[in-house]
Amino acid sequence: MTADPREILARWAPGPDFTVRYGDHPEHVVDVRLPAGDPTGPLVIFIHGGFWMAEFDRAHTAPLAVDLAARGYPVATIEFRRIGQDGGGWPGTFTDVSAAVARTPGLIAEALAAQGCRVPDLDRPVLAGHSAGGQLALWYASRPATPVRGVLALAPVADLALGHRLGLGDGAVAALLGGGPDEVPDRYEACDPMRLLPAGVPAVLVFGTEDDRVPVEVGRSYVNGARMAGDHPALIELPDTEHFAVIDPRSAVWSTVLGALHRLSVERDVDDD
């Protein structure tokens, strides 16, 4: 692990192979990185974190995306409007993510075909996300007839009501939705992963036990609720691990994250009971 865990937020990495656009807003873009040879894993659509705030964008996920592409996964990192931007927060953040995830496989296929390249199988991607992005991934996958094979949620804000009570991100949940569960209950019903169970999609949640930004109790709350509802998510708790290690290819726990991704890629039951 690096001396400063937040160093991953500014670490340089090579740029994407190409970028596609899924809408008209400047933030409606997706960076695409491809393996050097034939893919050996499914498409990974990654949603970045940052408590849904405008100051954090997809750039800090570049090292992660480069590493996964080098291991045979096509990777698409999506951007979306965030709190502090025109149209960000409720409902724009959610409509953007929905459009980006739904359109990305087709947009990649179109771009490759236009370049005369062979188009790999991009159907049924793994949806992955970190922190706020993990919440968005779980939310999207919980909707009916979602064409994803599974969700890899890294330190996700998987229980928005609990996240609001804990004051995560200095009140970021209320900033995202415009209030707490008692003030805007319909919005929590629409996008809190806890309110959308059972999801019916394989999921692995990965948390560090020393995470002081999204504590592991948030993951435990979601997994307990999901299992009571009939889902079978796995919860991986990493000792002596903080919030950013789970997205850092240089960290000591990266091999565990890769193992979780592989479990979802081969589409077998991921319940760790």
Image (spheres, rainbow, N blue to C red):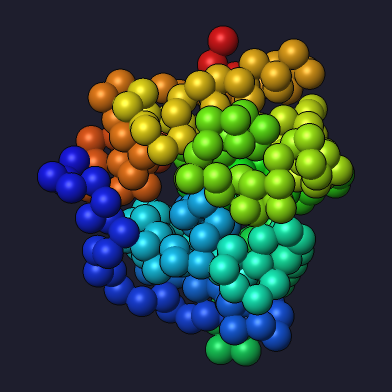
Q: Position of residue 78 (x, y in %)?
A: 56, 66
80 shown above or below 258: below
> Considering depth in this image, is 198 or 83 the residue closer to the camera?
83
Q: Position of residue 22 (x, y in %)?
A: 68, 77
| Residue 264 visible from this viewpoint | no
Q: How far across and how far down the image is residue 1, in percent?
A: 18, 41
**252 sits left or right of 157 in the view:** left
Front-lying residue, 170 or 148: 170
Place residue 150 in its image quadrant. top right
Q: Quadrant of residue 208?
A: top left
Count of numbered marks: 0
Taking the image as drawn, is residue 212 in sight? yes
Q: Tell whether 200 sits left or right of 4.
A: right
User: Residue 123 at x, y = what percent?
Assistant: 69, 57
Q: Residue at x 70, y 72 (%)?
A: 87
Q: Residue at x 36, y 76 (%)?
A: 15
Q: Residue furthest top?
A: 273
Q: Residue visible at 56% across and 10% down?
A: 273
Extreme left residue here? 3
Towards the viewer: 76 or 78: 78
Q: Residue at x 54, y 16 (%)?
A: 272
Question: Residue 85 sits in which quadrant?
Answer: bottom right
